[in-house]
Amino acid sequence: MKIYKKAILPQGFLANGVASGIKKTGKLDLALFYSKEPAKAACEFTTNKIQAAPIELNKRHLKYNRHFQAVIVNSGNANCFNGKSGLKDAQGAAQKLAKNLNINKEAILVASTGIIGSRLPLFKINQGIPLLVKGLSKEGIHKAKRAIMTTDKFTKEITLKLKINSQTVTICGLAKGSGMIAPHMATMLCFIFTDADIAQGALNKALRIAVDKSFNCITVDGCMSTNDSVIFLANGLCGNDTVETNKHFSLFLGALNKVCLELAKMIVKDGEGASKFIQIKVKKAKSFSEAKRVALSIANSNLFKTAIYGENPNFGRVVAAAGASGTNMQEKDLKVKVGPLNKKEINIDVSINRGHASAVVYTSDLTPEYIKINAAYS
Amino acid sequence: MKIYKKAILPQGFLANGVASGIKKTGKLDLALFYSKEPAKAACEFTTNKIQAAPIELNKRHLKYNRHFQAVIVNSGNANCFNGKSGLKDAQGAAQKLAKNLNINKEAILVASTGIIGSRLPLFKINQGIPLLVKGLSKEGIHKAKRAIMTTDKFTKEITLKLKINSQTVTICGLAKGSGMIAPHMATMLCFIFTDADIAQGALNKALRIAVDKSFNCITVDGCMSTNDSVIFLANGLCGNDTVETNKHFSLFLGALNKVCLELAKMIVKDGEGASKFIQIKVKKAKSFSEAKRVALSIANSNLFKTAIYGENPNFGRVVAAAGASGTNMQEKDLKVKVGPLNKKEINIDVSINRGHASAVVYTSDLTPEYIKINAAYS
């Protein structure tokens, strides 16, 4: 397996990014990802009960359609809490794009990130679409990756190449988000593309597992966005022996896990205001989900996070947060090990003596800078 | 009903506070509350799975005993996460006090607040106990109320007098805590005393309801202490017509609700670093607990709390936090009203159009001062 720290699109994929004027700064704000051949799709969306219009539209398209060719993404506006107009606007953009690409509108997935409760400026998007389509290219990924950013300080990109039988499969992932840290633009978006030939069931299963151990294992402030989406397209152009849930699966999953985990860690590291990257490992739990619940309870404790910021070895806060998770643990079985605090990367190890499962969660510290950023009105 | 903003002990109760040396500053750190006659007790403790030794001891005493005469409280040390020694130390203090008061040790309840994971200095407490007992008086309540404080900026006290038939019943409440805001001393403790004659079932029920609508409706940072306790003693000396769950109950409950709610609000207002007092009312929910869940989800959102600090009318954060509560709500049914933000007291009204129940939750904003305080090593 080879790892590249930049985005390299797999066979048959093109991309582009333009400045449509949604962002008043004139920065890139509209991205398009396109597969020449129809691709299978797997998606994971926020579990927030208030979901943005693009997620609603995607769910409809995923229900009735099995082949997808394009993903259009805008930054600067979340298209959330806009009532019926929100869905209409998302549909409008998909329609316009479908016409320009000459494909069915149901073959399109959409994503938005930015301010909540402001109407999407559809006319700007419609103006941008012909330019987006016209400029599609392999190298366009480097514009697209910037067009999905909001307050991100750096692009989040990774490419893996792995052999399945004799064929080289490429998996390329992009993400945006500073973990709900940004003031009005708080969404985590991730787009993954592969030329692997993979069965629909295997694709869904692999993404679900990989997201559970990566994006669902990071937290900056415990806040859950209305727009969080992971969209994964597989166009099969590599011609490898098809990945099934019982064939080449663990190999493929291992690579996808790596892509998702590296992107997730980049999101935590980009958390505005964050001065420390914290890894919390909970061991000897009854199950992965139990271990994760305890780790997240620690990771979301403001008292714990401020102690790390202050390089204050206050293990009592770890104990209190672990107990607050609701997991039935015995005081005598709880062991806490806190690594050196004067580093940029901090390790917390917790053992609860209940079983053999473990989980790792990543978070950042809570700093005055976080408050400064989030208190400001844009 | 008459309300006094200071502690006035009901008939038959005495109190005292001394400086035993647990606090290195020489401030008062040991409090005693005493009832001349055996009193009924009702208690509510933290639901944190890691519970401090005093809570463990109280649970044993409450299991086998129905009559209580004394509550001893120390500040400066939480006696938590100290293994078997913790329980032994708590028992030691109760034993010494029992001897000095000439009562059964099972008639004593205990509470501790302060740093977690440091052994309780039992010899200091044992030295303090004879002085505590010797100085017991009606006016001693004003020493006791200061001896339970840690980083509290002001004492939290209230007294209510109400008529039950022709008798005047007194309910007096004290609390300490700045809502898990204080660095190493994060506990909420509350002690309530009444001379009312009340049946055990009515006492338990009234406290459970009152706590649920007061101390369980406040949050500063969502952190749950290992030591939180509400201890309520009723010695019956007033000679009123006995309060039962079906007699004089709503009258008594109304008064107790008031005592608990006022003390809970004082705790939020004393939150170190807090610059705003926020009231979040969720209406039209299916049940009180549903309304409370939504309100707490908003109250615990760091993004929401920083927006209030910044006087930033970002209602999208209220929407996202409400949706993150997991309550099945429709976007079209969600109505959010945010009051003027340039005040000290902020009102947020949320309506979810699901039913007829409502809940009110109180919290404070998240400020750079919070981080400064909590990052510092004592």
Image: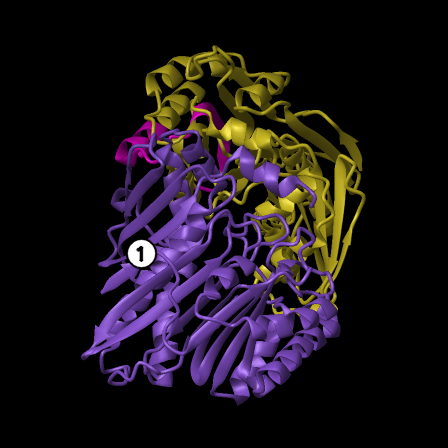
Chain colours: A purple, B yellow
Q: Quadrant of the N terminus of chain A?
A: bottom left
Q: Residue at x 47, y 11 (%)?
A: B25
Report whether residue B199 is seen. no
Q: Residue at x 24, y 82 (%)?
A: A246
Say which of A40 and B281 sits in front. Answer: A40
Residue A273, percent from left and from top: 51, 39
Q: Residue at x 47, y 29 (%)?
A: B375
Figure disc tally: 1
Q: Residue at x 29, y 45 (%)?
A: A350
Say which of A337 and A95 sits in front. Answer: A95
Say which of A99 and B5 sits in front. Answer: A99
**Amino acid residing under circle 1:** Ala
Q: Is residue B68 magenta?
A: yes
Residue B145, percent from left and from top: 59, 22
Residue marked by disc 1: A359
Q: Quadrant of residue A327?
A: bottom left
A154 relative to B283 in the view: left or right: left
* Mark 1: few/some/many CA within 10 Å (<14, 14-19, 20+): many
Q: Looking at the picture, does residue B34 appear above or below residue B81?
A: above
Q: Looking at the picture, does residue B374 appear above or below residue A79?
A: above
Report whether residue B67 is seen. yes
| Residue span colored magenta | B63-91
B78 relative to B342 in the view: left or right: left
B116 relative to B137 in the view: left or right: left
Q: Quadrant of residue A126?
A: bottom right
B154 relative to A307 in the view: left or right: right
Residue A15, percent from left and from top: 49, 70
Marked residue chain, label 1: A
Q: Is residue B131 magenta?
A: no
Residue A139, percent from left and from top: 44, 65
